[in-house]
């Protein structure tokens, strides 16, 4: 949002205070006048139609999503409260505008000429001229700025984002909206048409989102409960984005409700409907229902679509690829039901005992291995058994897919970033290895944890930077690796940790496709090395048999691909989109550290753990008796050191000896990160998954070809471990210890329209996406046409008759500039303009309403 806390507080609490005061001054008009508002006369419907066309646009759609992002689901409930107060504000604005216009028209005795009857007119009417005129001009200038930013740029920018998610070119969306809006400005009758179809577009938009909700995996009831829980503070986990709970939700809700409803901004007096009205009270009563649509109905249905499509408690990874976690925690009932649906026809009792431990999301390389096994051969040496769909005859047709027999193809064995173990000798602080192409990129060696449970986890690795030196004759060279830090003794370190492991580069080789026979495999196609270099430090035999290498893969010269998660079936977010996700701490705390005899609890130096404030001591038999204690943390000597902050628990070593408790376990914050959505056509299934599904491994196609792959936006391609400094780990490094991944709204200010596009991609097909797209365009267009008129009238007031033409030109240019604008930059301008509008319009409303009360008493 980029508003300072002071500016945000001024805007939010000004709206709240003015709304409460006007409600009191009008005698709770939103309740008192409700029967009249619901009478449904034709003239009332026409009034509402015009105001609705101006109010419901991308401010309602994108604004509600931003409220959801910033304040959590509870912000939507606060939008209801703001809309209720907005009804009184709209009532007061319209009543005052109509009364003032009738008064001035009577004075002029001209029933046809429109009269300026808005907050600017009220300020000039009821304040002394030296004060009223400048404030009125300031109000109009702020309204012009708001009109361009929120009425033009925001409409086209948010529409472009939504329709881009529906595979529509954003530039086309922006230019189309700008062009049609320009025509609407030039042809006044078009505004009448746009106003007429606006309510229809709102109804169709609601229908489209109901279709999304009906087909979404989440429960509408649970989504609504999260909205109410965030409103009351009973659901702290779903509160504000930064954990601020009710206060953050209130501020986000009121802020975006003001944008959505336009109540309190003073724009009502600029509408043609206000010009034509003859009965102030009836017109005001009929129009005050509009905030319920723009600030409550549309935001709520939009939020429900997002919350049900991406429910907070629904994991987005493929259940069939999950692995046992580092702490051997047991799967939840929901996770077991997912596995049963996949492997046991929905019957949980038919699952294997091992399935109960499958809770960790799997991170898999984005490339298909050309192997389903290995075998030795006296004639050709090491062989790799090819998948059955890979090899084809040498004389197959040119368009046949596969690898031709008796041909040589470039292949690669991928090295592990955790390295290959090498010996080190006492007194020689360097590692000596054979030099070859795979050794050229060596910059680090790795030491793993000696504990058997932690040895296989990259989180406990320590990476040591080394310098390299090559010596010896050509084709018989050696390389020495020496620590950059002279204080590091490799031999002594190897006595307390497992290592050193040298991080070689990938092993590339020429792979000949041959037809062979093996007792186990029968007649089969295999890969053999086309040439052998005895001096190369690595070979096909040494890499295939080593856990430090994986493959082989076809080598097309592309860069090494990252690891990715396979998304669950039905998760069809647009390819190329970027989504915020998170891994969450287990409910009873995170088991990632090691307890020292000193009473300190040390963990890998993950930066997000620095925000941990509490730890959990688990009761051995009754989770309800778990104890949460405060902790302090500091980074020291390459680790995070946690200390008890509870005087009753002097140190964790003492607590760990308590008879009925174990621990400590960190009550850590969620680890938030972004993922890019890719096609999963290159993601291989695990052998365990293939066996359970009765499938054979394929080398050219993946069983996940129709799925999505989620690639972490991270500088590293996979888990790397520590370099003894604070760092943001790759999610694959954190996954063995945490729950998830889940779609996240915490810590992120992302454009709400992106979420709506993702929701549409999940829940609509067979023309439903077209329905949503058309509705979005109409909603944006109606708002643009209305605000171009508001701003033009404000320009005429400040600069004189005819200035509105120049404003309309600026309006169209601004809407086109949305192509390169971000929602944050647009809202930064619009929100600050709203501060001026709310304050000055509030002054005008209070003055005008007091005058109406005074005249009523007379």
Image: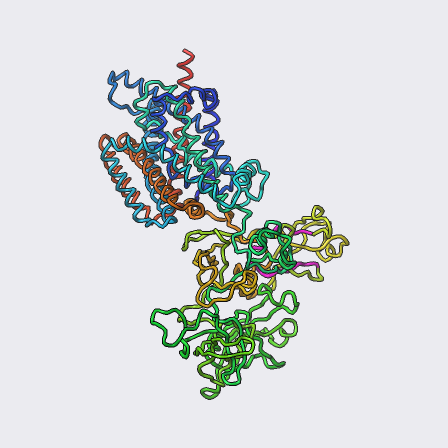
**Which residue shows up at 36% across the image and 39% down it?**
775
| Res. 258 in view | yes
Quadrant the C terminus occupies: top left
- The answer to whether residue 712 is magenta is no
Please provide percent x and percent y for residue 17. Answer: 48, 29
Residue bounds of the magenta highlight: 599-617
Q: Which residue is outermost to the top?
A: 858
Please provide percent x and percent y for residue 788. Answer: 29, 35
284 on left or right of 454: left
| Res. 511 in view | no
Please provide percent x and percent y for residue 240. Answer: 53, 42
Q: Which residue is more in the foreground, 443 or 538?
A: 538
Q: Which residue is more in the foreground, 697 or 415?
A: 697
Q: Which residue is outermost to the bottom?
A: 473
Please provide percent x and percent y for residue 225. Answer: 55, 38
Quadrant housing residue 26? top left
């Amino acid at each position: 949002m980029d508003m300072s806390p002071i500016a945000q507080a001024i805007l939010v609490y000004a709206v709240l205070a003015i709304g409460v005061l006007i409600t009191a001054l009008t005698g709770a008009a939103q309740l008192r006048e409700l029967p009249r508002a619901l009478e449904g006369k034709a003239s009332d419907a026409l009034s509402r139609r015009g105001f609705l066309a101006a109010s419901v646009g991308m401010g309602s759609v994108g604004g509600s999503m931003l409220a959801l992002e910033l304040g959590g689901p509870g912000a939507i409930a606060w939008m209801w409260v703001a809309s209720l107060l907005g009804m009184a504000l709209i009532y007061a604005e319209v009543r005052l505008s109509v009364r003032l216009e009738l008064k001035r028209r009577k004075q002029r005795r001209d029933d046809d000429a429109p009269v300026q009857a808005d907050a600017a007119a009220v300020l000039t009417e009821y304040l002394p001229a030296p004060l009223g005129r400048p404030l009125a001009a300031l109000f109009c200038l702020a309204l012009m700025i708001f009109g361009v930013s929120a009425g033009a740029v925001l409409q086209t920018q948010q529409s472009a984002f939504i329709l881009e998610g529906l595979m529509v070119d954003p530039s086309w969306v922006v230019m189309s909206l700008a062009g049609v809006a320009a025509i609407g400005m030039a042809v006044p009758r078009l505004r009448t048409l746009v106003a007429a179809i606006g309510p229809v577009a709102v109804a169709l938009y609601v229908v489209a989102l109901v279709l999304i909700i009906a087909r979404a995996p989440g429960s509408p009831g649970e989504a609504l409960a999260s909205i109410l829980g965030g409103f009351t503070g009973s659901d702290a986990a779903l509160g504000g984005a930064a954990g601020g709970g009710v206060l953050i939700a209130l501020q986000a809700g009121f802020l975006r409700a003001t944008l959505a409803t336009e109540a309190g901004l003073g724009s009502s007096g600029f509408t043609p409907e206000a010009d034509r009205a003859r009965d102030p009270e009836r017109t005001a009563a009929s129009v005050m229902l509009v905030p319920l649509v723009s600030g409550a109905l549309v935001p709520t249905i939009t939020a429900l679509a997002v919350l049900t499509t991406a429910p907070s408690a629904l994991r987005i990874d493929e259940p069939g690829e999950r692995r046992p976690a580092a702490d051997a925690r047991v799967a939840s009932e929901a996770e077991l039901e997912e596995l049963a649906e996949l492997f046991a026809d929905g019957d949980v009792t038919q699952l294997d005992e091992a399935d109960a431990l499958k809770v960790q999301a799997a991170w898999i390389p984005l490339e298909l291995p050309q192997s389903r096994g290995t075998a030795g051969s006296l004639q050709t040496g090491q062989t790799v058994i090819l998948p059955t769909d890979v090899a084809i005859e040498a004389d197959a047709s040119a368009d046949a897919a596969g690898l031709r027999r008796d041909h040589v193809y470039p292949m690669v064995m991928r090295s592990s970033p955790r390295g290959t173990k090498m010996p080190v000798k006492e007194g020689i602080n360097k590692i000596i290895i054979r030099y070859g192409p795979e050794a050229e990129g060596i910059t680090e060696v790795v030491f793993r944890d000696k504990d058997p449970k932690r040895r296989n986890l990259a989180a406990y690795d320590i990476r040591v930077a080394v310098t390299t030196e090559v010596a010896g004759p050509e084709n018989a060279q050696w390389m020495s690796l020496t620590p950059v830090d002279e204080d590091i003794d490799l031999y002594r370190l190897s006595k307390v940790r497992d290592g050193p492991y040298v991080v070689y580069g990938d092993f590339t080789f020429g792979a000949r496709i041959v037809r062979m026979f093996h007792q186990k495999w029968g007649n089969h196609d295999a890969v053999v090395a086309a040439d052998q270099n005895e001096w190369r430090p690595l070979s096909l035999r040494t890499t295939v048999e080593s856990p430090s290498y994986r493959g082989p893969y076809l080598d097309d010269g592309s860069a090494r691909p990252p690891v990715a998660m396979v998304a669950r079936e039905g998760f069809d977010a647009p390819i190329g989109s970027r989504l915020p996700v998170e891994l969450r701490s287990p409910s009873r705390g995170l088991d990632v550290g090691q307890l020292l005899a000193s009473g300190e609890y040390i963990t890998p130096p993950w930066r997000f753990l620095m925000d941990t404030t509490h730890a959990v001591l688990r009761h051995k038999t009754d989770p309800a008796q778990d104890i949460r204690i405060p902790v302090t943390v500091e980074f020291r000597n390459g680790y995070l050191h946690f200390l008890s902050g509870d005087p009753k628990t002097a140190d964790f070593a003492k607590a760990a000896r308590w008879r009925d408790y174990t621990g400590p376990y960190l009550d850590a914050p969620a680890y938030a990160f972004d993922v890019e959505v890719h096609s999963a056509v290159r993601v291989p299934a695990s052998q365990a998954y293939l066996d359970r599904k009765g499938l054979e491994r394929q080398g050219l196609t993946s069983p996940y070809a129709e799925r999505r792959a989620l690639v972490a936006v991270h500088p590293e391609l996979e888990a790397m471990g520590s370099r003894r400094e604070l760092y943001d780990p790759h999610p694959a490094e954190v996954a063995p210890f945490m729950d998830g991944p889940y779609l996240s709204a915490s810590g992120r200010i992302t454009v709400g329209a992106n979420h709506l596009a993702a929701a549409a991609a999940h829940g609509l097909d067979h023309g439903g996406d077209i329905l949503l797209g058309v509705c979005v365009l109409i909603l944006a267009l109606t708002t643009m046409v209305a605000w171009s008129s508001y701003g033009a009238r404000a320009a005429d007031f400040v600069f004189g008759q005819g200035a509105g033409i120049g404003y309309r030109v600026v309006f169209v240019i601004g809407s086109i500039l949305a192509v390169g604008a971000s929602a944050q930059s647009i809202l930064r301008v619009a929100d600050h303009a709203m501060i001026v509008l709310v304050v000055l319009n509030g002054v005008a409303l209070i003055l005008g309403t007091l005058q109406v009360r005074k005249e009523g008493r007379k």
